[in-house]
Amino acid sequence: MFNIVLVNPQIPPNTGNIGRLCVATNSKLHIVKPIGFDMSEKALKRAGLDYWKDLNIEVHESIDEFLEKYPIDDRHFFATTKAIKYHFQAKFQPNDFLYFGREDAGLDINLMKNNELNMIKIPMSEKTRSINLATAVSVVLYEAIRQNFEEFETIF
C-alpha cells in the first residue's frame, strides 16, 4: 500500500478520480484541508463512481495535524516542478507517502525545504507548467507500484 497525500486540493473531479485510483491500487488517500469544495459535492462522487464507499481515506484538518500524526522522514516524497530528480529515480517502498499540492499552486515550498532529496518531478516539455493532478498521481503511483510489484502482485 502507498499513501497518497493531497494537500489543499481544489477541483472535485480530480480528487474523485484520485480516490478511484486509490481503490484500484489498494492505496490510502489522505486529504489535507483546507480544500476548495465540499466533500459531499456531486462532482467528487461522480468521478469516484461507486468506488468511493471502498476508499481507504483520512481527512486531516491541517498540514500540522497531518504531520503530527505522520512526521516527515525519508519515506515521504514531494511531487513538484521545482525538483531536480525525476520520479523514476526515486527508490519507493511500500507505505511511502507521496505528496501532491493544489492544482493552481502546487506544494508549499516550506513543506519541502528540509526534504530536497525527496522532491520529485515528472518529465514534461517546457510548453506546459504542469499536468493534471490526477494524471500526476497516476504517473508517480504506478512507478512506485512497478518498483515494488512483487509485493503488490496479489492485489492485481
Image (cartoon, rainbow, N blue to C red):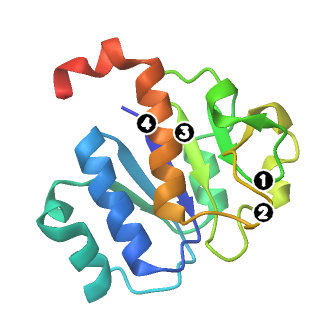
CA gap between label 4 and label 1 equals: 24 Å
User: Does 135 sit left or right of 118 as displayed?
Assistant: left
Q: Going from the N terminus, do you reach mark 1 or mark 3 first? A: 3
> Residue 33 or 87: which is nearer the viewer?
87
Q: Residue at x 66, y 26 (%)?
A: 90
- Report which residue position mark 4 lands on: 142
Q: Going from the N terminus, do you reach mark 4 or mark 2 first? A: 2
For residue 111, the mark is: 1
User: Does 112 sit left or right of 71 as displayed?
Assistant: right
**Amino acid type indicated by mark 3:** Phe
Q: Residue 14: image x %, image y %?
A: 43, 70
Q: Residue 59: image x %, image y %?
A: 42, 63
Q: Going from the N terminus, do you reach mark 4 or mark 1 first? A: 1
Name the mark nearer the viewer: 4 or 3.
4
- Report which residue position mark 3 lands on: 97
Q: Going from the N terminus, do you reach mark 2 or mark 3 first? A: 3
What secondary structure is found at the residue carrying circle 3?
A: strand
Whether 119 is drawn above or below 136: the answer is above
**Quick one: label 2, few (<14), some, or many (20+) residues within 10 Å?**
few
Q: Residue 6: image x %, image y %?
A: 53, 60
Q: Residue at x 27, y 58 (%)?
A: 20
Whether 1 is drawn above or below 27: the answer is above
Q: Residue at x 37, y 76 (%)?
A: 13
Q: Is residue 31 visible?
A: no
Q: Mark 4 and mark 1 in contact? Answer it, CB < 8 Å.
A: no
- Report which residue position mark 2 lands on: 108
Q: Mark 1 and mark 2 in contact? Answer it, CB < 8 Å.
A: yes
Whether 2 is drawn above or below 128: the answer is above
